[in-house]
Image (spheres, rainbow, N blue to C red):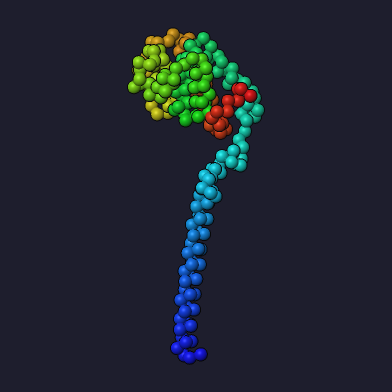
């Protein structure tokens, strides 16, 4: 083999090896990108479930009713006493608004469903979160109760303003106002229990 032929052969082999190296490097990069993608969203583009979600294999949270049955029964009794004699539509509006503010999807689903079954209109349900801009959908008593619900639920922000309390006191007698305050307290407690124990919206445990 001549010197020129040998050099040509070596040059061809070097070029080929370089192409193989580039191909191997590209393949390695592609594998790295694919692995990173699958780590974020799961294989085949499926979204990965949050690790803290009990339904995705995380540690399940306690069943409050079973773990603290006396406290649970006391809370059920307190809730029942608070709503006794109040307009059922008003009761649901209070519970819905507090659940909005506390971001409790479990209780919000429960009480909007209850309200629908009791004959509440879709229009009013949609307006609860923005009732101040849609006052014509609600009676003066309902507006006073919603304002009080907001103030008590967000009490750490600025307490319960005098004007909010005065309006509620003008619309309800003392016994009714006491029950409204009790109901606001009850739903706030339910919201916190549901959120702390990761209750899932749409799984109404009362209907087991």
Q: Residue at x 47, y 71 (%)?
A: 19
Q: Residue at x 35, y 17 (%)?
A: 135
Asked whether residue 5 is in view, the answer is: yes
Q: Is residue 198 above or below residue 115?
A: below
In the foreground, 176 or 60: 60
Asked whether residue 189 is in view, the answer is: no
**Percent coordinates x, y for residue 40 in the rendering:** 50, 49
In the foreground, 94 or 184: 94
**Percent coordinates x, y for residue 187 in the rendering:** 51, 22
Q: Is residue 56 above or below residue 92?
A: below
**Percent coordinates x, y for residue 109 in the rendering:** 51, 26
Q: Is residue 14 above or below residue 161?
A: below
Quadrant in the rendering for residue 60: top right
In the foreground, 85 or 119: 119
Q: How many marks?
A: 0
Quadrant in the rendering for residue 208: top right
Q: Residue at x 56, y 15 (%)?
A: 80
**Percent coordinates x, y for residue 49 in the rendering:** 54, 43
Q: Residue at x 56, y 33 (%)?
A: 198
In the foreground, 123 or 24: 24
């Amino acid at each position: 083999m001549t010197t020129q032929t040998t050099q040509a052969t070596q040059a061809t082999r070097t070029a080929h090896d370089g192409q193989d190296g580039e191909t191997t490097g590209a393949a390695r990069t592609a594998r790295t990108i694919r692995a990173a993608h699958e780590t974020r969203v799961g294989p085949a583009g499926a979204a990965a479930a949050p690790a803290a979600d009990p339904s995705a294999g995380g540690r399940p949270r306690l069943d409050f009713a079973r773990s603290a049955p006396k406290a649970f029964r006391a809370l059920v009794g307190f809730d029942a006493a608070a709503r006794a004699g109040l307009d059922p539509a008003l009761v649901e509006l209070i519970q819905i608004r507090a659940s909005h503010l506390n971001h409790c999807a479990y209780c919000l689903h429960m009480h909007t469903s209850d309200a629908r079954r009791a004959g509440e209109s879709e229009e009013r349900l949609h307006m609860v979160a923005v009732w101040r801009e849609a006052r014509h959908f609600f009676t003066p008593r309902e507006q006073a109760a919603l304002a009080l619900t907001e103030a008590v639920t967000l009490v750490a922000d600025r307490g319960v303003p005098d004007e909010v309390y005065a309006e509620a006191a003008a619309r309800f007698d003392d016994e009714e106002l006491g029950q409204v305050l009790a109901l606001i307290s009850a739903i706030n407690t339910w919201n916190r229990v549901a959120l702390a124990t990761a209750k899932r919206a749409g799984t109404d445990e009362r209907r087991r």
